[in-house]
Amino acid sequence: MNIFGVGLPEVTVILILALLIFGPKKLPELGKQLGKTLKSLKKASNEFQNEIDQVMNDDDEKEDIPKTLESNPKNKIYQDNKESEKKDLSKQENNKN
């Protein structure tokens, strides 16, 4: 058993010291409180991780949107870009002549 780098002998010593310091009546209450604290820390950590994942996924989606818009021929931006490219090409051809 290895919890946070602490082996079974160390855990036993800590529990005996806690029993001597707090007494047998307070020890279960302290254990319950510790359990609740660890549970809330784990919950907060999971929520934080979920938020990070959500932001990362949103960034990926934002990067994909322009590619989708450009490739859609019905899109006004796509049509405008194509028209401006045609105009530029025609100007370049006129300048060559």
Image (cartoon, rainbow, N blue to C red):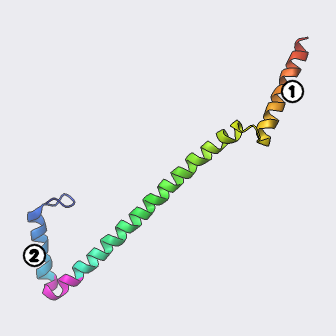
Is label 2 in a helix, a strand or a loop? Answer: helix
Which of labels 2 and 1 is toward the front? 1
Q: Residue 27 magenta-drawn?
A: yes
Of label 2 and label 1, which has the lower sequence position?
Answer: 2
Which residue appears farthest toward the bottom when viewing the image?
25
Query: Looking at the image, which residue sits at the far front?
Result: 74
> How many C-alpha atoms fall within 10 Å of the one at disc 1: few (<14), some, or many (≥20)?
few
Mark 2: which amino acid? Answer: Ile
Q: Nearer the viewer, residue 91 or 71?
A: 71
Q: Residue at x 10, y 69 (%)?
A: 12
Q: CA distance from mark 2 to mark 1?
A: 85 Å
Task: Tell me the quarter of the image containing the N terminus.
Answer: bottom left
Specify the amino acid type for callout 1.
Lys
Q: Quadrant of residue 70?
A: top right
| Predominant SS along the magenta part | helix
- Return the residue at label 2: 16
Q: Secondary structure at mark 1?
A: helix
Q: Say left or right for 89 vs 12.
A: right
